[in-house]
Amino acid sequence: MAQDSLVVADGRQSVWLPVICCEHAMKVCGQDIRIRGKLIRIAGLSADTYEFVDDPAAALDDLRHSDQRIDLFTFMQKLPETSRKYSYLMEWDNLAVLPVSTFDQWWTCLLYTSPSPRD
């Protein structure tokens, strides 16, 4: 299901309709920033769980000097750092993360390959 679509069901079939949302994009410190919302404008990295802000202070400074109105900027602290690194307000989030260096290492060492008890 696409993030920008809405399912309308009439009991027999589902119809996909596009949702009109106010979303803009811009580059800040060499990274793609997505801006969502009309009343409250929320900015964050386009690939929030895969990319990380190197210098949040510089990103905030660039956002303040941009022509876009931004009320809230969200970013994740780079993994595997689990202790608080920045002095900004924060919320803890849960992620299932597994370090993988190569496909072969994942396939031979980390992937659970024994048969299930039902077999």
Image (tube, helix red, strand yellow):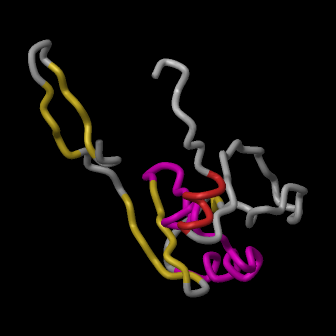
For the view shown, which residue lies furthest in the left direction?
Answer: 12
For the view shown, which residue lies furthest in the top direction?
Answer: 11
Residue drawn at x 35%, y 47% as measured from the top left: 3
Residue drawn at x 59%, y 49% as measured from the top left: 111
The mark tally for this picture is 0
Magenta-colored stretch includes residue 77 = no
Task: Residue 70: give x, y in percent of width and height.
Answer: 57, 64
Instruction: Locate the N terminus and report the quarter of the image it occupies.
Output: top left
The quarter holding residue 45 reads bottom right
Residue drawn at x 17%, y 21% as measured from the top left: 9
Magenta-colored stretch includes residue 61 = yes
Task: Residue 51: give x, y in percent of width and height.
Answer: 59, 70
Q: Nearer the viewer, residue 55 or 111?
A: 111
Residue drawn at x 26%, y 43% as measured from the top left: 5
Residue 53 vs 83, above or below: the answer is below
Magenta residues span 37-66
Task: Residue 110: give x, y in percent of width and height.
Answer: 64, 53
